[in-house]
């Protein structure tokens, strides 16, 4: 886990916010790139967490395609999710906001630059969970996909997690941390959620949940 701390304030309750598909329109850019590169028709609703299997590739083949994707402009500067900035500004008045991402630490610089550009002065910390840091090695992608952010949330004293991945909010719920399952995505739409988790379709739903 790698942390980037800015003006940390510990007197407020902490909300951890995922980046990809919560703050950034990340998955649509991956789907568009891979579909064009492989000449296949993959829709957003077809997405699973095992990208290689989804595209019919071996782990080694997918890693090579993903390395190529990282060199594209859509990855460097994905569009923001509608409504995120305006709601976060309101939440910041009441809460300490921390960005918590599963992106590998090798993407630290481009991620911090993007946060600075689109969400400047919003987050007191940007934390790289390190869940996928072994993906370029011989680690099994299925095993890596089982890892969650739960322990990190406990370590930083988070009170709530906003994330699009069911495994992360459900993992948090097991530790007594509230979760908002964000977005109406194919990978989270029909998944069972824990009692401590609330579904929110968009940032308007987040604002309603917190009353801001």
Image: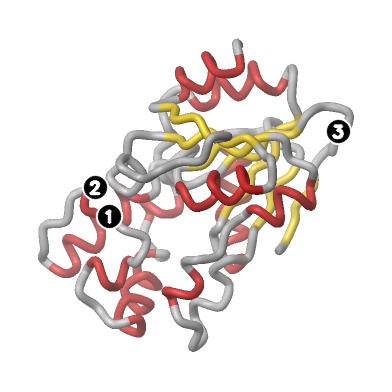
Q: Which residue is mark 2?
A: 44
Quadrant position of the C terminus in the picture: top right
Q: Which mark's residue is nearer the viewer, 3 or 1?
A: 1
Q: In this picture, is 92 found above or below 194?
A: above
Nearer to us in this view, 209 or 89: 209
Q: Residue at x 61, y 43 (%)?
A: 173
Q: Position of residue 190 (x, y in %)?
A: 30, 42
Q: Residue furthest front?
A: 195
Q: Which residue is mark 3?
A: 9
Nearer to us in this view, 170 or 15: 170
**Real-space Cα separation, disc 2 to disc 1, in angstroms:** 6 Å
Q: Residue at x 45, y 18 (%)?
A: 204
Q: Is residue 79 left or right of residue 18?
A: left
Which of pointers 3 and 1 lies earlier in the amino acid sequence?
Answer: 3
Dot 3, crowdedness within 10 Å: few (<14), some or many (≥20)? few
Q: Residue furthest right?
A: 11
Q: Position of residue 109 (x, y in %)?
A: 62, 58
Residue 47 circle label: 1
Q: Residue at x 50, y 27 (%)?
A: 84
**Real-space Cα separation, disc 3 to disc 1, in angstroms:** 37 Å
- Cβ atoms at labels 2 and 1 below 8 Å apart: yes
Quadrant position of the N terminus in the picture: bottom right
Q: In this picture, is 19 found above or below 68?
A: above
Q: Quadrant of residue 82?
A: top left
Q: Residue at x 36, y 45 (%)?
A: 191
Q: Is residue 102 left or right of residue 48?
A: right
Q: Position of residue 163 (x, y in %)?
A: 51, 42
């Amino acid at each position: 886990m790698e942390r980037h701390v800015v003006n940390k304030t510990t007197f407020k309750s902490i909300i951890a916010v995922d980046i990809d598909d919560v703050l950034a329109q990340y998955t649509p850019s991956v789907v568009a790139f891979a579909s064009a590169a492989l000449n296949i028709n993959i829709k957003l609703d077809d997405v699973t967490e095992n990208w290689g299997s989804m595209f019919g590739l071996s782990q080694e083949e997918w890693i090579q395609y993903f390395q190529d994707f990282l060199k594209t402009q859509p990855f460097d500067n994905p569009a923001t999710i509608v409504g995120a900035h305006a709601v976060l500004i309101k939440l910041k008045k009441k809460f300490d906001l921390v960005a918590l991402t599963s992106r590998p630490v090798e993407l630290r610089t481009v991620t911090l630059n993007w946060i600075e550009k689109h969400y400047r002065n919003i987050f007191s910390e940007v934390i790289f969970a390190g869940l996928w840091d072994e993906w370029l090695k011989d680690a099994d992608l299925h095993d890596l996909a089982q890892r969650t952010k739960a322990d990190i949330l406990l370590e930083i004293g988070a009170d709530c997690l906003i994330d699009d991945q069911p495994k992360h909010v459900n993992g948090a719920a097991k530790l007594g941390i509230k979760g908002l399952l964000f977005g109406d995505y194919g990978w989270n739409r029909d998944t069972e959620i824990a009692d401590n988790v609330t579904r929110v379709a968009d940032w308007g739903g987040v604002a309603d949940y917190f009353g801001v």
